[in-house]
Image: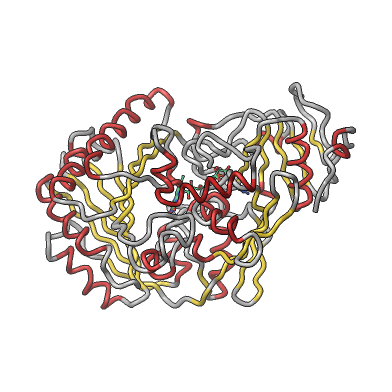
């Protein structure tokens, strides 16, 4: 589909496709049918209610928010934005830590594109569906998709950047389960990216990150039957030196455990000064196997809670790990590291000591165990670069309630990150971080040159961009 730019420049369309409100200095709005898109201006209820994003630190008020409903609506909107040289951002779930789905120009907001349908083992979803929308659809059908745990995260940003969840070691990342993507390109054309059509673009869209290569409108996801999950949790509160010893045991175990198990290890500091280590995850191999496997940790150090192992449906496990289904919004910053070879004891001490040196509760370090399925895909088979040999990903996270606390919390976060520099490099594009100097290499390593070549061909005028786009 190719929409003529000139055909869109002329007239204002009658309501209700345009919800009028306070009108900033905008060019004449495009003539898009209500069935293809809704345009909202500041002051209208839809505009105001759509402002919410995960991170209040980065939220902006755009002059115009466009909700495409169809690929045609998306194409018309992109054509108009490009013709008018208007800056814009693409928004799906609005969880970008650095606000890459925010703009003070226009936002192309996919939240009205949430249609989900199943055809055999292929789930077709609109680009505005959340992970929760997808899980709710799949759960009662006994099918699963290997995405992240937060149900309000959007499929678009998540999958385009990789997407790690608690099925990752058994079934791969979210981007490993996509068989095709419908996009609108920089020229306002609806195109397909899959193994047969635009294979380079398909490669780039699996780990290259959102907002660089076009506006995704639909994804085809491969889903598969799933049985019950054995969900586990266990917690320790230990002095730093013992915490380091337990962390070493987790490190020796988690990346090399049977593929059926995927787990995380959350490290923080209690008011008592002790280090709190929380191991949680799930397995498709059953309770006995989990209890046996977890001995790698429970034998290494006596836990402060009983080891809990419970069998539940996959969807109940999704609910268990969800942290709630309400859209959360606060102030936060995240940073990340990939540990790509065995962390020695000094590195582990740097992590635990770095947390011990901060005020209690200031920063969380959440370690996601890699290996398994993630490892078996070649690092150049998709744009997602952290495959074979990757031990785990650390997300350093600080959240706070009021803007005044931000300077202090971000300084804490940066101090912990600085402590880990000798042992790490690399960062996860989905935990985007504007502090990174060489973010291109940190996110994409050896895949960067190919990504840049694909970008130069697909979007030579850099129509799709944000502060860390390819
Ligand atoms: C509370 C929370 C929990 C998280 N949990 C996990 C987890 O378990 N595992 C994990 O791997 N990650 C996790 N993340 C990170 C998450 O995967 C990324 O923040 C992801 O990019 C968010 O996608 P989104 O669509 O919600 O965000 P958005 O802010 O809407 O978009 C993110 C990026 O994608 C682009 N984009 C949006 N829509 C489109 C589109 N239609 N076409 C092209 N580009 C588009 C945006 O421009 C932006 O650059 C979590 C983040 C948060 C805040």
Residue 368 in view here: yes
Whole-percent x and y of residue 403? 43, 25
Whole-percent x and y of residue 19? 79, 35
Whole-percent x and y of residue 170? 39, 70
Residue 326 in view here: no
In the image shown, does 449 or 255 lie closer to the viewer? 449
What residue sits 42% from the left and 36% below the top?
Answer: 332
Residue 152 in the figure: left or right of residue 230:
right
Q: In which quarter of the image is residue 292?
A: bottom left
Residue 68 in the figure: left or right of residue 50:
right
Whole-percent x and y of residue 460? 64, 41
In the image shown, does 48 or 469 lie closer to the viewer? 469
Relative height, residue 314 to residue 57 (above, below): below
What residue sits 31% from the left and 34% below the top?
Answer: 413
In the image shown, does 94 or 466 lie closer to the viewer? 466
What colouring does the structure picture have?
secondary structure
Relative height, residue 97 to residue 131 (above, below): above
Residue 43 in the figure: left or right of residue 443:
right
What residue sits 30% from the left and 75% below the top?
Answer: 287
Relative height, residue 217 to residue 124 (above, below): above
Marks counted in the figure total 0
Relative height, residue 286 to residue 297 (above, below): below
């Amino acid at each position: 589909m190719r929409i003529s730019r000139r055909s869109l420049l002329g007239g204002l369309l009658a309501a209700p496709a345009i919800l009028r409100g306070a009108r900033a200095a905008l060019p004449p709005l495009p003539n898009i049918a209500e069935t293809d898109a809704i345009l909202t201006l500041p002051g209208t209820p839809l505009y105001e209610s759509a402002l919410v994003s995960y991170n209040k630190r980065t939220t902006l008020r755009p002059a115009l928010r466009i909700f495409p409903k169809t690929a045609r609506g998306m194409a018309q909107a992109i054509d108009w934005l490009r013709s008018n040289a208007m800056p814009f951002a693409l928004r799906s779930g609005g969880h970008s830590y650095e606000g890459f789905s925010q703009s003070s120009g226009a936002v192309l907001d996919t939240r009205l594109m949430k249609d989900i349908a199943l055809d055999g083992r292929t789930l077709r979803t609109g680009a505005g569906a959340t992970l929760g929308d997808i899980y709710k659809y799949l759960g009662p059908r006994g099918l699963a998709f290997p995405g992240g745990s937060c149900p309000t995260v959007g499929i678009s940003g998540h999958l385009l950047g990789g997407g790690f969840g608690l099925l990752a070691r058994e079934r791969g990342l979210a981007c490993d389960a996509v068989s095709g993507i419908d996009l609108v390109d920089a020229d306002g054309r609806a195109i397909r990216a899959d193994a047969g059509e635009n294979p380079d673009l398909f490669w780039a869209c699996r780990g290259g990150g959102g907002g660089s290569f076009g506006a995704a409108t639909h994804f085809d996801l491969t889903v598969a039957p799933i049985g019950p999950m054995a969900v586990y949790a266990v917690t320790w509160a230990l002095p730093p030196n013992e915490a380091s010893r337990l962390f070493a045991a987790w490190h020796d175990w988690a990346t090399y455990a049977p593929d059926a198990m995927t787990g995380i290890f959350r490290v923080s500091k209690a008011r008592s000064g002790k280090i709190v280590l929380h191991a949680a995850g799930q397995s498709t191999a059953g309770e006995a196997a989990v209890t046996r496997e977890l001995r790698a940790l429970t034998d290494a150090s006596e836990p402060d809670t009983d080891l809990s192992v419970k069998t539940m449906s996959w969807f109940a496990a999704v609910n268990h790990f969800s942290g709630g289904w309400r859209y959360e919004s606060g102030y936060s910053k995240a940073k990340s590291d990939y540990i790509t070879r065995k962390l020695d004891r000094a590195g582990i001490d740097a992590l635990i000591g770095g947390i011990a040196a901060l005020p209690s509760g200031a920063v969380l370090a959440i370690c996601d165990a890699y290996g398994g399925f993630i490892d078996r895909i070649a690092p150049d088979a998709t744009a997602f670069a952290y495959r074979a040999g990757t031990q785990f990903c650390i997300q350093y996270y600080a959240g706070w309630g009021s803007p005044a606390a931000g300077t202090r919390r971000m300084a804490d976060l940066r101090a912990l990150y600085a402590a880990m520099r000798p042992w790490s490099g690399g960062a996860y594009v989905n935990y985007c971080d504007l502090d990174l100097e060489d973010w291109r290499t940190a996110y994409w390593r050896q895949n960067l040159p190919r990504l840049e070549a694909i970008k130069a061909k697909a979007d030579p005028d850099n129509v799709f961009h944000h502060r860390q786009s390819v």
